[in-house]
Amino acid sequence: MLASLRFARGPRMSTPDVNLELDCRGMLCPLPVIELGRRLTDVAVGGTIAVVATDVAARVDVPAWCRMREQEYVGEGVAEDGTPRYVVRRVS
């Protein structure tokens, strides 16, 4: 079952279908966003990637990466084990 998302300026909502989930547990900054950048083209435009990361910096890094790369930050939720999960939509 997919976890719920908490949007930065909205209510908790259900997770959209995620096309690719990256397990970045144990990776330290900047490795989760490097992995996100490396794998972005693995999903079609309009598709989503979830980054599951234990590094607390990912909470800031993933949205910042989205702004810099002009991709859509969908929101934050948690994986089934409680690990933070950040969802990004590829827009280009």
Image (cartoon, helix red, strand yellow):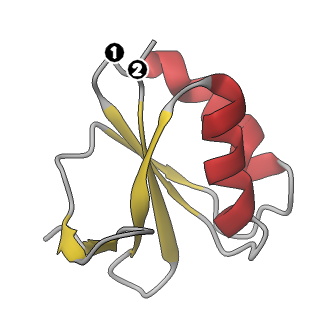
> Helix or strand or loop: what does disc 1 sit on?
loop
Residue, x 81% and y 48% (percent of image)? 31
Residue ID at (85%, 63%) = 28
Q: Nearer the viewer, mark 1 or mark 2?
A: 2
Mark drawn on residue 27: none
Question: 25 or 85, which is in the foreground?
Answer: 85
Q: Are marks 1 and 2 in contact (CB under 8 Å)?
A: yes
Decide: is 6 above or below 52.
below
> Could you say which is closer to the camera, residue 9 or residue 76?
9
Residue at horizontal 45%, vertical 68%?
8
Q: Residue at x 56, y 27 (%)?
A: 39
Element at badge 2? Answer: loop
What residue did someone put label 2 on? 91
Residue 36 locus on image (x, y percent): 62, 37
The front one of 68 and 59 is 68
Pointer 1 local density, CA inside 10 Å: few below 14, some 14–19, many at least 20: few
